[in-house]
Image (cartoon, coloured by chain):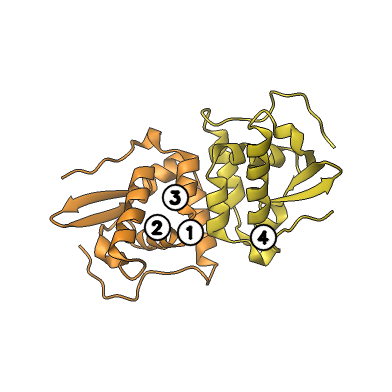
Chain colours: A orange, B yellow
Amino acid sequence: MTLPHPTTDQISLPIVLAVLGDPTRLAIVRYLASKEGVPMNCSKFLDLASKTNLSYHLAKLREAGVTRAEAVGTSRLITLRRDDLDNRFPGLLDSVIAAADGDPALPIVGTVPEIDA
Amino acid sequence: MTLPHPTTDQISLPIVLAVLGDPTRLAIVRYLASKEGVPMNCSKFLDLASKTNLSYHLAKLREAGVTRAEAVGTSRLITLRRDDLDNRFPGLLDSVIAAADGDPALPIVGTVPEIDA
């Protein structure tokens, strides 16, 4: 099953910034960036938010073009659209991730066991 | 009169990103960045939004620590907190502005006569 995603050209700067402007979504993006393109099972992020909230955050990221999601059975495999974002907005993702890494108040993924794809 | 502003340390990445995630506020930031620290009268931005909406957007920018606003009589003089933002989030503002400059769909300031301080 294929979920709707914007094309690279459809990715909008204000929408990407607004979507990144949330601690939970920043944590998801930082984690995906650290995995360098390896698809992550969405259950990986359940320590960040309830299932309902997580679905909401993952949909926002996908609809903005920040992530790609593939439905596999009842779960989703998530990847960061790094090439698309770097292509559209050079340097933006790296500066956001670096800034987030420098802020110890932000949540991070990693308190539940890994359930990788 | 002094309006409330966060200190440099209080500037929050998610809040800054969320506040920048709006076409009108991006236009204000790009314009202020192009003026390199010269305070701008808030009326400069009236081509972007109604007075009420503009007040809202300018308050969001100030409260996030993106801009500094000084009330002078009935108007406000606005500057970009570039040093504070560059200090907290190196490279972020430049990459956001470069990305915005590359998007012709975003609004720009400049259809009303300059009423600079």
Q: Estimate the spatial distance between the alpha carbons at disc 1 and disc 4, rounded to whole Å.
A: 15 Å
Q: Amino acid at mark 3?
A: Val
Q: Is residue A45 visible?
A: yes
Nearer the observer, B28 or A115: B28
**Would you name the residue on which mark 1 appears?**
A97
Report helix, strand or loop for mark 1: helix
Tag 1 subunit: A
Q: Are marks 2 and 1 on the same chain?
A: yes
Whether residue B59 is situated above or below residue B51 in the rendered picture: below
**Quadrant showing the C terminus of chain A:** bottom left
On residue A29, the disc is: 2
Q: Estimate the spatial distance between the alpha carbons at disc 2 and disc 3, rounded to whole Å.
A: 11 Å
Q: Quadrant of residue A49?
A: bottom left
Q: Quadrant of residue A9?
A: top left
**How many residues crowd mark 2 within 10 Å: few (<14), some (14–19), many (20+)?**
many
**Would you name the residue on which mark 3 appears?**
A19
Q: Estimate the spatial distance between the alpha carbons at disc 1 and disc 3, rounded to whole Å.
A: 14 Å
Q: Is residue B37 visible?
A: no
On residue B87, the disc is: 4
Report helix, strand or loop for mark 4: helix
Q: Are marks 1 and 3 on the same chain?
A: yes
Nearest to viewer (mark 1 / mark 3): 3
Q: Are marks 4 and 3 in contact (CB under 8 Å)?
A: no
Q: Are marks 2 and 1 in contact (CB under 8 Å)?
A: yes
Nearer the observer, B88 or A25: A25
Q: Are marks 2 and 3 on the same chain?
A: yes
Report helix, strand or loop for mark 3: helix
**How many residues crowd mark 1 within 10 Å: few (<14), some (14–19), many (20+)?**
some
Q: Amino acid at mark 2?
A: Val
Q: Position of residue B50 (x, y in %)?
A: 65, 32
Q: Are marks 4 and 3 on the same chain?
A: no
